[in-house]
Image: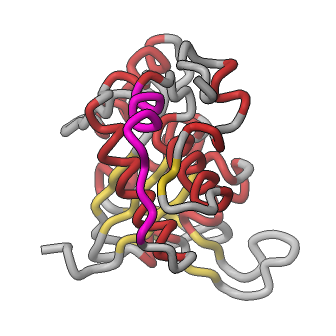
Amino acid sequence: PRKNKPFVALNCSGFSPELLESELFGYKAGAFTGANKDKKGLLEEANGGTLFLDEIGEMNLDLQAKLLRVLENQSFIKLGSTTTSQVNVRILAATNRDLKEQADTGHFRLDLYYRLSVFVINLPSLRERKNDIGLLAEYYLKEFARKVNRTNLKLDEKLLATLTKYNWKGNVRELKNVIERLVILNDGEVIGTSQLPNEFFIDSTNINPFD
């Protein structure tokens, strides 16, 4: 039922606690210096749809308590307001932390953890799903090749084998970055290992690119 409704995303690590609160809940004019007019928060912007909270493990404990109220009864109070606002929002959250461990050590609210973990999708790191590396590399190759109008580009077998051996500490973002680099630097139709960054080989047990 929400598929055609708003989908709003917020990276919780990209704001200070104060700014994150105002982004999430909005504020009334005069709530703080510079608040010259009312502002809708992302909860209101996502009303009827979905709010995606990326890196929720970075959210401080006070703000977690306010988010828990939203999850419990779909209500909140804007900064500078005394009245309660109601929304109908589905919350999706993502994190690269072990939230259960964070909760056990007091760095994440246990009640919020249980409220969020009704349905959990665990995404293994890229190095744990080697079979996906080639598929993702080909996908990003098509994406970046199209941007530079070079749709005839291909990845050679040695390069694909090298990519599969790599440790990918930066996961999919790192793979995407490497493929974009290869597309930019390559001047032929087939992309090989010679254009891979030096650190790629320093941090891995890969074969020498010039063998």
Left or right placement of residue 17 versus residue 82 in this view: right
The residue located at (44%, 12%) in the rendering is: 104
Position of 131 relative to 81 (above/below):
above
Picture coordinates of residue 172, whole percent (x, y): 46, 42
Instruction: Check the image and report above or below for 10 versus 174.
Output: below
Say which residue appears at 73% left-offset and 30% top-offset: 198
Q: Position of residue 191 (x, y in %)?
A: 51, 50
Magenta span covers which residues? 152-164
Instruction: Please report the residue visible at 44 percent of the width from the left and 59 percent of the height from the top.
Output: 141
Q: Is residue 18 above or below residue 42?
A: above
Residue lying farthest to the left in this orientation: 1
From the viewer's side, name the closer residue of 178 and 56: 178
The picture places residue 40, in percent across and down from the top left corner, at: 56, 79
At x 22%, y 81%, the residue is 4
**Front residue of 91 and 109:** 91
Say which quadrant the C terminus sits in. Answer: top right
- Would residue 154 be counted in the magenta stretch? yes
In the figure, 134 relative to 167: above or below?
Answer: below
- Would you say the magenta stretch is mainly helix, strand or loop? helix
Residue 28 image-quadrant placement: bottom right
Observer-nearest residue: 12 or 77? 12
Q: Is residue 84 left or right of 106 when viewed as pictured?
A: left
View extreme (bottom): residue: 37
Which quadrant of the figure contains the N terminus?
A: bottom left
